[in-house]
Image: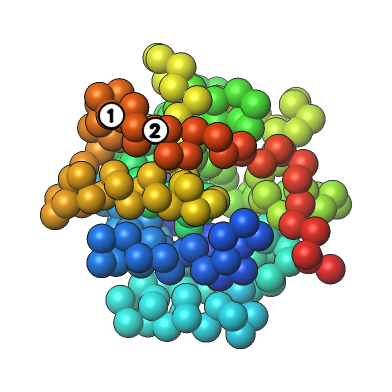
Amino acid sequence: MQESDPRVVAVIQARMQSSRLPGKVLADIQGQPMLLRVVRRVQRAQTVDQAVVATTTSESDDPVEALCRAEGLACFRGDAVDVLDRVHSAAAAHEADVVVRITGDCPVIDPQIIDLTVRSFLESDPPVDLALNRFVDDRTFPVGLDTEVCSFEALESAWKEADQAYQREHVMPYLYDPPGRFRVLHVRNDEDLGSYRWTVDTAEDLAFIRAVFAHFAPDDKFDWREILDLVRSRPDLAALNAGVKHKPLKSIDTRRK
């Protein structure tokens, strides 16, 4: 009897109370909320069986659930503080064998990159517990294409054992920090493009993303290499958010008590 393929579930974490740009996950980008842009791109990945939005039980995130309901998207509501618990619970509720973690502030997340990372995880020999295409201080893909893929068993180990605030907030660090605790595969790009910033944490980031979508409109299926060609030909676009610094690995949201 042939063993069935593992069920791959993408968990997209999203909440309204962002520390640097509150409400960003529903910010308008060419007529659609950012979160919907993220989910639709994730759904185009050939390796993903289901995408689920993981938001919080806070009243402030009622609009996130409302969007999911209106668009027919799977939505799980969980802990507002313990993001690891929320992601783990969402993955468990949707019977994931393999978990793909995506954040809701990456509206140009690329299906090709998701597929590359998932296939690298599934085809690794010897097997790995986690495949990811970036570390905070070591990345070759632009910020905003971040994809982390792990077994449900590894995620459950982190859920049970992680006891540091940054491990609970950023979900995956327990699996790779310190190195050696789990088997980790770093998926690298041939060219170092880690200095490019295509995520949304600030108003400057949002201005950049809106400019990118406006350039390609009405097409919304442009890929990451087309964005790269655009920003290389239009340095003024990359300059919009060039001064924004990425958060360090062990940063935590101090508003969370």
User: Which is nearer the eye, 125 or 8?
Assistant: 8
How is the structure coloured here?
Answer: rainbow
Q: Is residue 199 above or below residue 86?
A: above
- Position of 121 with respect to 73 (left or right) is right
Residue 132: mark: none
- Residue at the image point whose x is 79% and y is 30% from the top: 178
Assign a secondary structure to mark 1.
loop
Neighbour tally class for label 2: few under 14, some 14-19, many 20 plus, Cα within 10 Å: many
Q: Are marks 2 and 1 in contact (CB under 8 Å)?
A: yes
**Residue under numbered circle 1:** 234
Query: In the image, what residue type sits under mark 2?
Result: Ala
User: Which is nearer the eye, 30 or 104?
Assistant: 30
The quarter holding residue 189 reads: top left
- Residue at the image point whose x is 59% and y is 80% from the top: 60
Query: In this view, which residue lies farthest toward the left?
Result: 218
Quadrant in which the C terminus is drawn = bottom right
Q: Is residue 158 above or below residue 243?
A: below
Percent x, y for residue 86? 64, 65
Query: In the image, what residue type sits under mark 1?
Result: Arg
Percent x, y for residue 36? 35, 64
Is residue 196 shown to the viewer in this render?
yes
User: Which is nearer the eye, 136 or 128?
Assistant: 136
- Position of 2 with respect to 88 (left or right) is left
**Residue under numbered circle 2:** 238
- Residue at the image point whose x is 68% and y is 49% from the top: 170
CA gap, disc 2 to disc 1? 7 Å
- Residue at the image point whose x is 37% and y is 82% from the top: 69
Neighbour tally class for label 1: few under 14, some 14-19, many 20 plus, Cα within 10 Å: few
Is residue 159 shown to the viewer in this render?
no
- Position of 21 with respect to 122 (left or right) is right
Percent x, y for residue 219? 15, 50
